[in-house]
Image: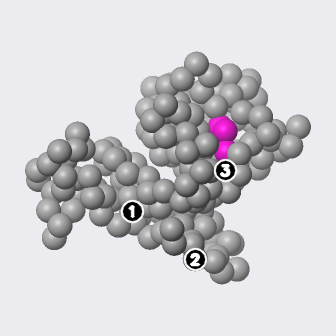
Amino acid sequence: MLDCPPMSTAAKSTMNHWLMKSEPDVFSIDDLASRGRENWDCIRNYQARNMMRDDMRIGDEIFFYHSSCEQPAIVGIARVCSQPYPDPTQFDRTSKYYDPKSTPDEPRWILVDVEFVRKLERPITLVEIKSHATLADMILTRRGNRLSIMPVDQRHWDFIMRLTDR
């Protein structure tokens, strides 16, 4: 496994924050912890793809969120550790994520690598997130939001990080 490149001081000052959802029975925070680093593949939503391609930078911090489970929650912290690059599943005819219109010369789908930072002491559940007025306008809490990748405002990031310290 390759180590992620170190972050420069300038990169830290322009850091973005993200929330990335994964179903724990497909890929959990424990899976990421055991592997250390993994590619975030199989994204087939143009808006999520565009954020990975255009806005994610090495060093950006991520809330790792377990979704589609009994108690959806932020369960850990990860970090973007690669530039975007083509998702190989789009070229694999045996993959359910195969895209016949995508070619190696003109790939449609990209991914980034993420690295494990830490597991939270306790999950910050969706119920708890929705209970705080400060987080009422967080994208995650918006009705009908189904994106698997979403930006997190600095004020929301800081507030949730304070919740993890409780």
Q: Residue 5: percent from the left, percent from the top?
A: 58, 77
- How far is the residue under mark 2 from the one under mark 1? 18 Å
Amino acid type, callout 2 = Pro
Q: Residue furthest top?
A: 70
Is 150 positioned to the left or the right of 62 in the image?
left
Span shown in magenta: 74-78
Measured as percent of width and height from the top left, residue 99 is found at 17, 49
Against 111, is 6 above or below? below
Residue 101 versus residue 53 in the image, above or below: above
Of circles 2 and 1, which is in front?
Answer: 2
Residue 45: numbered disc = none
In the image, residue 75 lies in the stretch drawn in magenta? yes
The quarter holding residue 31 reads top right
Q: Residue at x 88, y 37 (%)?
A: 166
Q: Give 10 or 7, whichever is nearer the viewer.
A: 7
| Left or right: 33, with 84 as reference point | right
Local SS, label 3? strand
Tell me the amino acid under the disc marked 1: Arg
Vertical comparison of 166 with 16: above or below: above
